[in-house]
Amino acid sequence: MNQSVEHHPLTPFLPAGCRLLMLGSFPPPHQRWSMDFFYPNYTNDMWRIMGQVFYADKDRFVDKQNKTFKLKLLCRFLEEKGIGLFDTAIAVERTQGNASDSNLKVVERTDVKALLERIPACEAIITTGQLATQLLQQSLELEKAPAIGQSVDFQIESRNIRCYRLPSSSRRLMGSVEQKAAAYAEILKQHTK
């Protein structure tokens, strides 16, 4: 086995009644983690976006003192809202050893169709970056991938599912938490409990 291949360290977070599945590309290197969960990098804005969208409080899930996130509160929130989480790659090679999607060589994609079978109430998928969107398009054999802020619909068996592409929550990209939250708000509220 190639020692440089890194396998996904987390299992999919798929709460009962999950209506929305959020898919990133792959977690950052473990030394960047502040918690053992999705979007673990303390400088990533995903959990600040969620706090801003649902509570008008970007620090709702932030533990500033310990430079991490309030994992129990966060998991309870995701379960209540019916938001599932995973990534579009399950095995990668890091060409530069960092978290940048441009430095990931995908060895194995996630079987998104199998994930969707486990969450029959799911009606929408959000991808949070270019690589995640490309991998989702390949996995679901979509004719075209949605542009940022846009969506495409597809059918799997008798289900209609809408796929959205939203801006990355990475701090490397321009925009405040409030600006990013504005891009997420309508879609998150439309597809959650």
Image: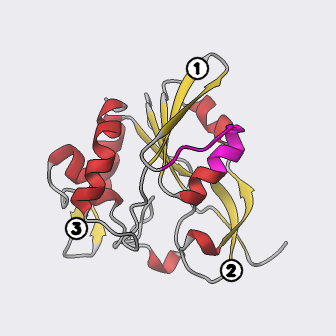
Q: Is residue 68 magenta?
A: no
Where 137 falls versus 93 (above or below)? above
| Residue indicated by mark 1 | 159
> Who comes first in sequence, dot 2 or dot 1?
2
Where 44 falls versus 150 (above or below)? below
Q: Are marks 3 and 2 in contact (CB under 8 Å)?
A: no
| Residue indicated by mark 3 | 63
- The residue located at (49%, 37%) in the rendering is 151
Amino acid carrying label 3: it is: Asp
Residue furthest to the left: 56
The stretch of residues the image draws in magenta is: 135-147
Where 169 falls versus 152 (above or below)? below
Kind of element beneath mark 3: strand
- Nearer to us in this view, 181 or 151: 151
Alpha-carbon neighbours of circle 3 within 10 Å: few (<14), some, or many (≥20)?
Answer: few
> Who comes first in sequence, dot 3 or dot 1?
3
Amino acid carrying label 1: it is: Arg
Kind of element beneath mark 2: loop
Residue furthest to the top: 158
> Percent x, y for residue 63?
22, 67
Tell me the quadrant of the picture where the C terminus can be found. top left
| Residue indicated by mark 2 | 95
